[in-house]
Amino acid sequence: MKEKLEAIKNEALKELKEAVNKAELEGLRVKYLGKKGELTQILKGMGGLSAEERPVIGKIANEVRDSLENFITEAAEKIKSVEKENKLKSEIIDISMPGKKQTIGHRHPIDLTLRSIEEIFINMGFTIEEGPEVEYDQYNFEMLNIPKNHPARGEQDTFYINDNIVLRTQTSPVQIRTMLNQKPPIKMISPGKVYRSDAVDATHSPIFYQVEGLVIDKGITFADLKGTLEMFIKKMFGEGMNTKFRPHHFPFTEPSAEMDATCFVCGGKGCRVCKGEGWMEILGCGMVHPQVLRNCGIDPEVYSGFAFGFGLDRMVMQKYGIDDIRQLYESDMRFLNQF
């Protein structure tokens, strides 16, 4: 058995010296020192030795095991060192080569404008509320005084998931959800993406952004609406801006109005952008209809409020002098890099 142990040791050392990677080294360790390894099998047979032979052979077997384990440890370190060296050689960076220019992105003009709008209204005490883009017909139309046979449905033709679920045409449903979930006083804006089945042209898109606002409290009047919107316009476009209100009709407000502001391009003198009128249409607004308040469980005899809404895309176009809405969605870097 002594000769057999020496033979195993010599054969194992020979094979270990030829191992070139961790996988081969591990295979040889299992072959000789594993549970079913050659050295282990010999140790299992020591029970058949005499009492005199057992300690002698046991000592030799332990020396062989220690020798192989030490060699395996040293070989593993050498292989690790070689692999590390090879990896470093393959990852050498030639610092004399010209570097690659990293393109740094920046915010989209829609996001830039929205952030300015949000900051203005937050400073005026408004909160920002959000809601789902896939909305119930009830919230998008019915509770806003727009029943299924109402003409306004044609103006806001949208994409229907089924008879009761639509892609929202406005962010007004967020106002409904807020009134249902919060008690007055309420002072909020609801920016977000909306959908209408419009043909794409220079001023229309089936997907666009809208910002709507709502204030509900005791004693709210049209004067509060006018003062709020005038302050917003001056903060947004400059102190020299003037505003005017024109009568209009919206199913969810009474009375209703559209607000115009001084053309920011010509300062009111008349130009191509404002079609020579000196004014630009900015937004629609009005006092919240009493029935809308009732629909949301708010007593119109106690509370009143105003609402307003505008297309964010149009605001961006007015702010930066963009004449085609499609430029905001085509991801043309030559255009976007200007902002």
Image (spheres, rainbow, N blue to C red):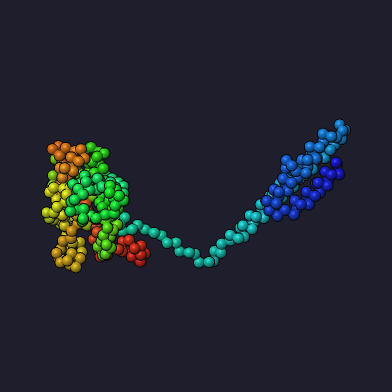
- The image position of residue 295, as x and y in percent, is 20, 41
Q: Residue at x 39, y 59 (%)?
A: 105
Query: Is 204 located above or below residue 35 in the figure?
Result: below
Query: In the rendered image, is residue 233 in sight?
Result: no
Horizontally, residue 8 falls left or right of residue 190, namely right
Image quarter (top left, top right, bottom left or bottom right) of the C terminus: bottom left
Horizontally, residue 69 falls left or right of residue 118, namely right
Give 51 or 161, whichever is nearer the viewer.
Answer: 161
Location of residue 336 by image quarter: bottom left
Query: Is 140 located above or below residue 49 in the figure?
Result: below
Query: In the rendered image, is residue 328 in sight?
Result: yes
- The image position of residue 49, as x and y in percent, is 85, 35
Image quarter (top left, top right, bottom left or bottom right) of the N terminus: top right
Q: How many marks?
A: 0
- The image position of residue 6, as x and y in percent, is 83, 45
Q: Residue at x 86, y 44 (%)?
A: 3
Q: Residue at x 49, y 64 (%)?
A: 99
The residue at the far bottom in this view is: 272
Q: Residue at x 36, y 64 (%)?
A: 333
Give 289 or 242, whichever is nearer the viewer.
Answer: 289
- The image position of residue 38, as x and y in percent, is 78, 44
Give 309 or 91, whichever is nearer the viewer.
Answer: 309
Location of residue 292 by image quarter: top left
